[in-house]
Structure formats: C-alpha cells, structure tokens
Amino acid sequence: MSTPIVSRISGPVVVATDIEQAQMYDVVRIGELGLLGEIIRLEGNKATIQVYEDTTGLRPGEKIVNTRRPLSIQLGPGLLTSIYDGIQRPLDILRQESGDFISRGKIIPALDQHKKWKFVPIKKKGESVSQGEIIGEVQETPLIRHKIVVPFGTHGQLSEITEGNYTVSENVAQIKTNSAIIDVGLSNWWMVRKPRPVLSKLPPESPLLTGQRVLDTFFPLAKGGTAAIPGPFGSGKTVTQQQLAKWADSNIIVYVGCGERGNEMTEILTTFPELEDPKSKRPLMERTILVANTSNMPVAAREASIYTGITMGEYYRDMGYDVALMADSTSRWAEALREISGRLEEMPGEEGYPAYLGSRLAEFYERGGKAVVISPEERIGSLTLVGAVSPPGGDFSEPVSQNTLRVTRVFWALDANLASRRHFPSINWLTSYSLYANDMNEWYKDNVSSDWIKRRQEALEILQRESELQEIVQLIGYDALPEPEKGILDTARSIREDFLQQSAYDDVDTYSSIKKQYMMLSIILEFGKLEAEAIKKGISSSKVGSLEVRKQISMIKWTKEEQIDQLINEIKVNMKQQFDKLLMEITI
C-alpha cells in the first residue's frame, strides 16, 4: 500500500495522493510539523486539502496522516471567558507556549484538561432519561449555569450519576440503553459544519433589546433573527457590534473577529476583558466567547472561524439560553472563500467570488433562529446572528452585501456621510429596514404602549419628509420655505439630534431602556404637533424653536433612567405653559 504524500502545494491548498479511506472534510496532519488541514475535494486517488496554517517550507513528498474525523470542536465548561483562533486553539495558552507568534503544528486542547468543575446532578440513579434532557449542572461562571445534557440519539436509564469535582475529560454519568452503556462526560465533540438539530423553529415574536434607540425603535431585530450591518471603513461597524455585545439582552455573546485588522482585534481583545456587564456588574467576559482570526492569520482558518463560532452558539442555545453571535466581518470570510476557490481553479462567479457564495451565506444564517430544542421538556433557546459586511468603497451592490441581504431580515445601513458629520450610530434611517417590526407589534403593544407602532411610523414619515424638503432647500434656501415646512424640519432635526444620535462613551446615553425610548420619542412628536398648531395660528417657527422647553427636550438623553419620569412630567407642564403664553401674545 502506497504512503500518502504531498504532491502539489499552492499557498494554503495542498494536493495529496493515496490517502487511505479519505472522506470529504476529514482532518489531516501534514508534514513533519503536523500542519492541520481539511479535505475539500476528492478526485481518484488525489485529495485536495485546505491547510489551516502557514505552508511555508512544506515540500512535495512529505507524509500525511488522516485523523478520519471531520473538523470538530470540544464543547463543555470553560468555553466562556476564552479567546480562540479560527480552529478553537486558545490564544492565551498559545502565547504562553510559543510567544507572540503562533508555532505551526501546535496542538493545544481547547478546554483546560486539568481544571476541576463542581458537577451537581438534578437526576437520580435509576431514572429514565432521553436525548437532550438535563441531568446536571456546572456553575461555569457566576453568571451562567452550564447544563449537562443527554447526548443526541440516547434513551435509557441512568445506571450511574455522582456529584463531585470532575475534569472535562472525565465521565459524570452512565446511561444504560437497550444495546450499550453510554458514558456522559462534562464535554463532548461536534462537527462545526453540521448544524445541531432542533425540534422546530418558532416565529419571531419578541425583540432583542439593545438599548440603542435607532435599532430598538426604528429597525428592531427579533430574538433568533438575522441582521446585516454593512458599511465602509470608519463608519462604526465595530463600535456598533461592541455596543450590541455589551447591551443586548442575551445570556451569551459569541464575538467572531473574522479577518479583521490586527489592531482592531487587539483593541477588542484588550477592552472586552475589562468591560463590565451592565446588568450584573460582573465582567462581561463571564458570558462571552471571543474567536479571533485576524487578516494576517492563515486564510483557510478564517473560512472555518464562523463555523467554530456558530457551533458554540448552538451549544448554549440547546441549553435554553438566548445567544447573540456577532460576525465581524463576513466580507473577509467571503474573501477567504474566493482565495481558496481560485487556488482550486474553480470557475469564478461575480467579482471572482465562487458561484456557491450565496448558498454558503444562506447556510450560515439559516443556523440562527428561535427554536424548540431537542429535549423532553421542549426547552426554548434562541441564536441571533448579526453579520458585519465591509463592502469595498461602501458599494452595497457588490456580491457579499447583496447575497447577505437576500437571507437576512434586518438591514442596518451604515453611512460614511453621517459618520463624517459625527452622527453616531451612523445608521441611515432612509435606507435601513427591518422585516420583523410588524411581527412584533403585539409584543410592543403588551410591553410598551398600544400606540408604539403609530409613533414609530410618524417619526419615520417626518424623516422621509425632511429628506424631500432638503432637496428643495438646496435649490431655494431655508428662508424661502413656508413656515409649516420649517416646522417639519425642526421636528426632524430634534428626532435626529435628540433621539437618533447616541454616545457609546457616555455612561448615561450609552443605553436607553425601551420605556425611555418611547417617552423620548413621544415628547418630541408632541412638541412637533404643538409647533404645527402654533404655526397655523401665525406664530413663526423661530419663536417656537427659542422656547426654553426645547432645550429641556434635548437633555432627556443625558438623564438617568430613575429620573426620567420626573423630567418628562416637568417638560409636559412647561410645554403647555410656554405654548399657551405664545398663543396669548398673538391674541393680544
């Protein structure tokens, strides 16, 4: 029998011959260093392999070992607080062992194999259990209880289950089935390209509240929903995603830095461990997993990184948690696909991307959703996906943006012009949209106000009208506009500056509860209506704009949540008094 060897090398793509029992997506070790790779094409006795590490120095004739297992990751206690590369190697441990530059061929377990975890059973010996059922818990971090569940496809009786301290490689229970004894440990393995199954997907009925006014009010994202956030360089994609990671009402955050610049990922890796979870006042990392694969890391590992991240997200969703995954950015992931496709000499599609780009993106986003997970008690968990897109030059017509928009239902369009005017978040309210807004009307009626939808629609119409009037202003000038139109522009400016603009770096303005958002928007629209009525009675818009209450409205965003009711009541009283006084001056 021939020995499998390397016959051809093209960057991260290697062709090998005579690999015994080779199957698609088998992981192999290549050469003396044991570089990690994955079979992506089989043709006769030839196997094409994408290598997850730098192939510098690799030469034809080197040996290859087939592990006969697809690319899989270890799932268990210890994932939270960890920082991994695209193939689940812990970067902090890698740095300790090999310095600032990762040694090639290094095999390091994803989870600490020596740390003991306190396992507390919730089932007793002799009880019948079935797949997905929770048999015990581990306090993974002060914020998250890690649920230990019966493996998929397993039904039987607990023949052993013991409380105690265990490592992730030790068994905590045994299940006796009709044909075998199944060991259950604290950890298990899962193939990253295979979605974890669920019983059924549920419709999106509740929003993922983020505390960001432009998102929650105008373009809401449902729990289990999918969103695209495309924008050019400097428009605020990373800061917006960091805000989502910090404030979204999810139990678990998975942040995948896919092909981003090293300095950006360095900032994330240094700031995230220092961030405080605003709700629990604990470190945010206690409910966060970071996957970092920078643009100077091997391109094939970049392609694998989003699958690694989403598999971890599905794992916690199956415990019944709400998980949010931020992928920054899927454009760099698509570029990795394009490079590998080119080296495979595949027929290129639009702009050189492979013809299957659209289907790969769809497969990724379809793994999200709110679902009834496989378990006897039918637990419900959700996995929300937010993918940043970095179109060259801000051109949303390029293939990655277009294919992403086809499969996502929320479009947060970042605008370089807004960013240059220091309007943040720089999400364009005229081009963005959410297809979840109507699906969640009942939630807003029950939890916020019965006129929420009406208020939101009024504000969007005013902003649309402002856009039309701005074109007229450029032709004839502001002073030539009729007074009613000036009033519309005043109200629109208040919506933009006092409501939509939000500072991520201010302790108060960084987050607005849904109640505060409703009260802010309502008072701005109420002022706009009173201004329109006053203008009809002959009062100029400039006089209305000089009212003292107008300044009070602009200060709402800087007001703490516990003081908001008092301020709103004061504004209502002052607004009535000051408008009544204006009208009295006219009659006199």
Image (spheres, rainbow, N blue to C red):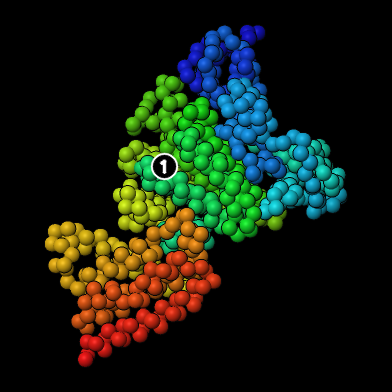
**What residue sits 38% from the left and 81% below the top?**
574
- Left or right, 120 with reference to 153: right
| Residue 239 in picture, x, y percent from top left | 46, 48
Residue that mark 1 sits on: 389
Task: Give the residue type that dot 1 points to.
Answer: Val
Q: Is residue 585 left or right of residue 311?
A: left
- Total numbered circles: 1
Q: Is residue 538 left or right of residue 572?
A: left
**Quadrant the N terminus occupies:** top right
Q: Quadrant of the C terminus?
A: bottom left
Write down the quadrant of residue 185 in the picture. top right
Residue drawn where x is 63% and y is 58% of the image: 280
Between 183 and 466, the one nearer to me in the picture: 466
Q: Tell me the residue at 27%/76% (across/down).
A: 544
Q: Residues within 10 Å of mark 1 (few under 14, many from 20)?
A: many
35 over 506 or under it: above or below: above
Q: Work out whether residue 103 can be spotted.
A: yes
Element assignment for label 1: strand
Image coordinates of residue 202 in percent, x first then y, are 55, 56
Q: Is residue 202 visible?
A: no
Between 365 and 530, the one nearer to me in the picture: 530
Please provide percent x and percent y for residue 253.
Answer: 57, 48
